[in-house]
Amino acid sequence: MTSQQTTTTGTLIIERRTIDMVPKNERHGTPWSQFTLWFGGNMQITAIVTGLIAVAIFHAEPLTAIIAVLVGNVIGGVTMALHSGQGPRMGLPQMISSRAQFGVIGATLPLVLVICMYLGFASTGAALAGDAISHLLGLPSTAGAAPVVGILIFGVLTVIVSVFGYQLIHVMGRVATVAGILGFAYLFFQLFANYDVGASFGEGATDAATFMVCLTLGASWQMTYAPYVADYSRYLPADTPVSTTFWSTFLGSVTGTQISMTLGILIGAVSGEALLGGPVGFVGHLAGPAAAAFVIYLVIIVGKLTANTLNAYGGIMSTVTVITSFNAGTRITSRARSIYIIVFVALTMVIAIAASADFLNNFKNFVLLLLAVFIPWSIINLVDYYLISKERIDIPALYDRRGRYGAVNWTALVSYAIGIAVQIPFLTSDTYSVLGTFNGPLADVMGGIDVSWAVSMIVTFAVYYPWAKRTMRPPSAMIYPRDYTPEQTGQIAVV
């Protein structure tokens, strides 16, 4: 399976690598590409909606919400950027590294949850982008109905970018960065020019419980990127310092997200009933003249296409990782890869079209519940990689159920289950309306402040680290595959 590269003639190569290691002499690019990818990928409508939730659902005071999501973005950004640092060293997609902790087959548990996450984010993104395309084309819409034509068009665009893969995804990140900076600057200008934004400050909840739930929105947004990030840093040169990869990823993701969420918070604070027409429609209305609204819809589509391609690309990586857990393979053909992408995107379109009209509330529950299942996975993965294995991985063993990491590692699986279960006593129905009237027995003791994810971080670390330190046997040095060289045949080129 060949590398993806740009030839001297400007030829774009369709990516054909999946979960196999990227050889050193196929590595290219600089950490700056991580900044633009994560900055541009977060300057998008779904991040605006997440900020909007802080005011529209949780009724937070705007300045309180802005500060809280900033703290959450910083906390979560540290976690996701540490995962990004694994990419250049291993040359592997993010989730296959879970086999070093959970075992080759045991890793399928978090992998299945990750695939569900990709489907959820991709379908909500398709719904929002489809709405933007419908507005852009002037297609008629019915209240509560999904923008079917827009969703289908967006799905086709997602397939095209995902099939080309890594290189084109990074190009989209650069385009989305420029488009996002210009488009969002204009929207902020319009917001302050047309609304008395300052009057909304001081209105809303400022209590500790509200601050914590807004912080959780920011943290959950960043931490749910943890299963993605190494997918897009694995082609960097193997000697790229972890610190450089960390900071470029961290600054790009946190900055882009905070700008988007702040815009969402301010829109929620001033929009009132105008928001009932949908967040995409309101943003178009905020843009003003038809020509300006047309451009803003394009900005929304570009940002969302970048983000949704990350979901499709990562979803295929995780799907292939699950499949090869049982057949000991490391590669699939380019045709099979393309078919997987088409099926995945088609499924997200079906979900998007069938989605409930109660979008904001359902999306809020989806984002927050993801945090509950990915916090313990992230802690286990980072603790093992940086503190126990100390960046030493037996890469061939990741593909061998009889190798160093075995089929199932109960140390990680039990620690993971404990990390999820320990959150239940602290859950509150105010944060997770999907729980109905249920409140965890310790929620009232905490004054209604939901600290479940923070408890999970502490407990998962306390359980896994000493246990794994006694039982894990990492190699004394990084072990690479024998055929750690590029293949020179079978490239698919499109000029």
Image (tube, rainbow, N blue to C red):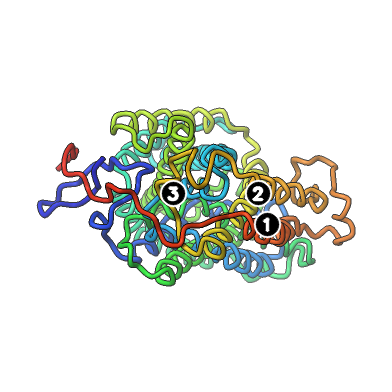
> Callout 1, which amino acid?
Trp
Image quadrant for the N terminus? top left
Q: Looking at the image, is 208 positioned above or below residue 365?
A: below
Give how far across and how far down residue 241 sits, in percent: 38, 70
Q: Residues within 10 Å of mark 3 (few under 14, many from 20)?
A: many
Q: Is residue 169 visible?
A: yes
Nearest to N terminus: mark 3 or mark 2? 3
Question: In this figure, which residue is indicated by the disc labeled 1?
Answer: 467
Q: Quadrant of the C terminus?
A: top left
- Identify the residue position indicated by label 2 in the image: 411
What residue is disc 3 on? Answer: 307
Residue lying at 42% horizontally and 28% vertically, measured from the top left? 343
User: Along the horizontal axis of the image, is 233 left or right of 460?
Assistant: left
From the top left corner, tell me how far across and down residue 390 is, in percent.
50, 64
C-alpha gap between disc 3 and disc 2: 34 Å
In primary-sequence order, the first of circles 3 and 1 is 3
| Circle 3 or circle 2, nearest the eye | 2
Name the one closer to the observer, 17 or 166: 17
Q: Give the distance between the C-alpha atoms of the residues marked 2 and 1, in whole angstroms.
A: 7 Å
